[in-house]
Amino acid sequence: MRLLVGRVGRAHGILGEATIEVRSDDPDSRFAVGAKLQTDSQGVLTITSGRIHNGVLLLGFAGYSDRNEIEKLRNTFLYADVDIDEEREDSGDYHVLQLIGCQAFLESGELFGEVTDVINLPGQDLLEIKTLTHETLIPFVRQLVPIVDVKAKRLVVIPPDMSGVIA
């Protein structure tokens, strides 16, 4: 699947490096030297150099050797082919696209709703679930989402107001 992994920012220095706005969960492999990234307007770009400078990722691309050339890539979106179904190191890791469309069931087996979005926050992710009457947000933690079966597009949720937790 073709996924957006970054956007080219401004040129940095005179040797053809650009700042990159990272939009990937795995920047180490997506932006490794030799990796090929697709674009909508510039074809395929091959990464020739990469480094972090003051907390910002800088990349160089084959065929872009100076500041003027790299500036032509500014605001170009970078895409990678990603297999969202590949085995992950942590069995609790899921790709957002694996979760969207999953049917959410209560522990009783009753259909609760459908996952329509995953909101990434610094502390934890939230599942946005559309029910028949409203939308609700449920923290994506094991205590509230004890079962996730992405192959069957099914998960079990314990909505916070039904979890028995006393505030």
Image (cartoon, rainbow, N blue to C red):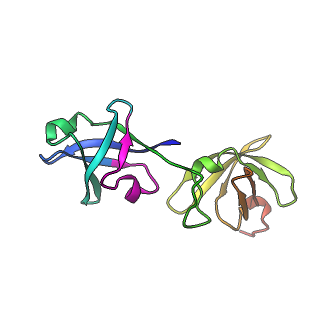
- Relative to 152, 61 lies left or right: left
The magenta stretch is 21-39
Foreground of the two, 154 or 108: 154
Residue 19 place in picture, x, y as percent: 27, 48
Residue 164 place in picture, x, y as percent: 79, 67
Q: Is residue 23 magenta?
A: yes
- Relative to 30, 131 lies left or right: right
Residue 3 place in picture, x, y as percent: 48, 43
Q: Is residue 76 magenta?
A: no
| Res 28 → quadrant | bottom left
- Vertically, is 143 above or below 28? below
At 60% from the left and 57% from the top, the residue drawn is: 94
**From the image, which quarter does the C terminus lie in?**
bottom right
Foreground of the two, 29 or 98: 29
At 87% from the left and 59% from the top, the residue drawn is: 108
At 54% from the left and 49% from the top, the residue drawn is: 83
Q: Residue furthest bottom?
A: 166
- Vertically, is 73 above or below 98? above
